[in-house]
Amino acid sequence: MKGANKAEIIAKYVQSIKDFKFVDPEIPYYHMGATIADAILQSGLNYKTVVKPRIDDILEKYPEAQATSAFLKLLTEEGPNKILRWNNSEKPNRVIALTNFFVANKIESENDLKAWLEDESHISSLKDVRGVGNKTVDYLRILSGIKTNAIDRHLLNFISQAGIEVDDYSEANQLINEVADFMGKDKALLDHSIWKYMSEKRSKHSRCGD
């Protein structure tokens, strides 16, 4: 595609896929317990079979843990392993650490989180929390209602399949946002739609013997 930039190439690739669908993410949860758990658990795990059932569980069983301080109280009283239905300690400890961090910074709701994340001077301290890197920061942005994307292996593979190479997380993140702008789509909508398309495609392929 002579003369086309990377964003245009990926946009054309999206439009060429017959079974690609734009799917709205079901967020924010308006439940900081679910938001924190989702942000911490999602890394490196199958979202559909491992993470989502636990998030649904938190939303259904613990409606009182909407505010961050209420979720911290629940974690303290019940224990994170019980709340998350988790055996080892690493991710439950990360959930506690992030919850404590948000309480210390007076972040009690997704609206608070959104406003706090929009101040770039806050991001370095957030990354000091164990388990929080670039992707988790951007995923927290999405979960709080900020229009952006969070680059993971599914989005990187999609970019590669479109015939584009990127050097790092930042370039990939900026590129997907540019694709959304080029297509006139909500950035978080495009992120979720690519993620859903790629994860479902991988799941179908896996059942065929991958």
Image: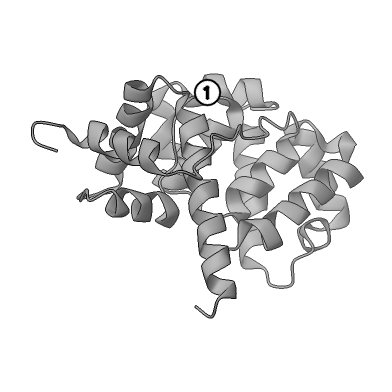
Nearest the eye: 14 or 122: 14
Q: Position of residue 78 (x, y in %)?
A: 87, 55
Vertical order, 106 against 61 (above or below): above
Locate residue 208 relative to residue 169 in the image: left or right.
Answer: right
Quadrant location of residue 89? bottom right
Left or right position of 196 against 18? right
Q: Residue at x 87, y 52 (%)?
A: 77
| Residue located beneath label 1 in the image | 116
| Label total for image | 1
**Residue ID at (24%, 31%):** 8
In the image shown, does 6 or 75 lie closer to the viewer?
Answer: 6
Q: Nearer the viewer, residue 21 or 79?
A: 21
Q: Residues within 10 Å of mark 1 (few under 14, many from 20)?
A: some
Q: Position of residue 112 (x, y in %)?
A: 62, 21
Tell me the element at label 1.
helix
Q: Quadrant of residue 99?
A: top right
